[in-house]
Amino acid sequence: MKSNKIYLISTLLLLSIFISACSSSVYASTSWHGLTADTNFAYLAAGTQVYAVDLNTGTQKWKFQDKPNVKGFYANPVLTPDGQLLVPSYDHFLYSVDPNTGIQKWKSEDLKNRLIASPLVIDNNIYQPSSDGYIYKISLTDGTTSLKIPTNNEPLWAQPATAPNCGCIYIASMDHNVYSFDSGSGRQLWKTTEDLGGSIVGKPAVGLDGTLYVGTFGSQLVALDGATGSVKWRFSTKDWVWAGPALDNNILYFGDLSGNFYAVNASDGTSVWAFKPNNSIVDTPVISGTNIYLTTEADSLYTISTAGTISNTAVVGGIIYTAPVITGDKILVAPTGFGTTLLVALNLENPNSSQKWAFTPVK
């Protein structure tokens, strides 16, 4: 049986087809959280609203919007170099919010379908994938669209990636392909030279040599030449790979929907080690020093050494679909279905010790 997240998304898509207006509680029950943070605040897109949470106290600074967004939020918000918080929404809009106040700066009016993926920001431009199969190039200044870049009409749920000095963006698609486009003109540079065997919904990891690494619903991790889109190697997994891998010191770390966690050599796709935690893995792990922090669907956060040894297991509660975020001495975990608690802060050095705080929205 596939992950509950697959069931959740299927339900969501059916709702979008058959229900044109419904209460916010319906969408809240089918949403997973988006999370990012700076040094002072966490920004949590949870259900029908976005919250700024003080990292020291776990208290709410602001919420966006004042009235719940009926369609809801799913992607991780993105902080920009010029001080904006970008929030993609299921209501077809990309919102720019002041991270200090929660006040809307602008919203992009030109997008035509649901936004599931986070945007990529390069210089003064935003590259926002949409469920209509297009990437929208949007001004960081005012939210106007300058380009609408087509793929193959299949939904785009993965955040784009780029590489230094390539002048390009990479986007993975549900049509089993990865595309590269010129970031200025939107001209297609290449499309993968062969079918990758399954949909791709995770952000590609990019190596120092420009190699791209993507996980697929064809139960594989695939390495691609960043200049041509040709396949360099394939690594078979035991189940679908939902999220993109984390790349550190030439080792790729990632999981599959049967709960297997892998470390694979980025040069040739050979296995380094593998083990199986307690449930499905549906997001990218985060790495700090020699530790890997991994969440599973069954309410747990694992601390694993890069040598493959589990050093800590923290039971958080709820169901975890969102990658943890490290900020300072804290690691943030955003469970769903955990009563009124939407965000938990744990001690980075010892997550299994007592919580630093748990966030519940102000009514």
Image (cartoon, helix red, strand yellow):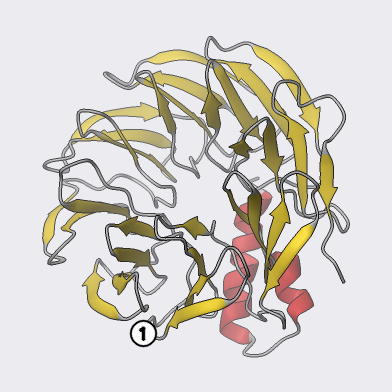
Q: Name which residue lies at 44% across and 41% down.
A: 244
Q: Name which residue lies at 32% across and 35% down.
A: 222
User: SS of the residue at dot 1?
Assistant: loop
Question: x, y (%) of residue 206?
Answer: 30, 36
Q: Which residue is mark 1?
A: 110
Question: x, y (%) of residue 360?
Answer: 84, 57
Give whichever of 257, 23 is nearer the camera: 23
Give the crowd class for mark 1: few <14, some 14-19, many >=20 residues within 10 Å: some
Left or right of 36, for residue 114: left
Residue 148: in sight, yes or no? yes
Left or right of 67, for residue 306: left
Give whichever of 86, 27 is nearer the camera: 86
Q: Name which residue lies at 41% across and 20% down.
A: 264
Quarter of the picture containing the C terminus is bottom right
Amino acid bearing label 1: Asp
Residue 317: in sight, yes or no? no
Question: x, y (%) of residue 233?
Answer: 25, 27
**Residue 67 in the image: above or below residue 287:** below
Left or right of 152, for residue 347: right
Quadrant of res 158 = bottom left
Question: x, y (%) of residue 307?
Answer: 53, 9
Give whichever of 207, 9 is nearer the camera: 207
Left or right of 335, for residue 196: left
Quarter of the picture containing the N terminus is top right
Q: Name which residue lies at 32% across and 81% down.
A: 144
- The number of discs equals 1
Give whichever of 294, 123 is nearer the camera: 123
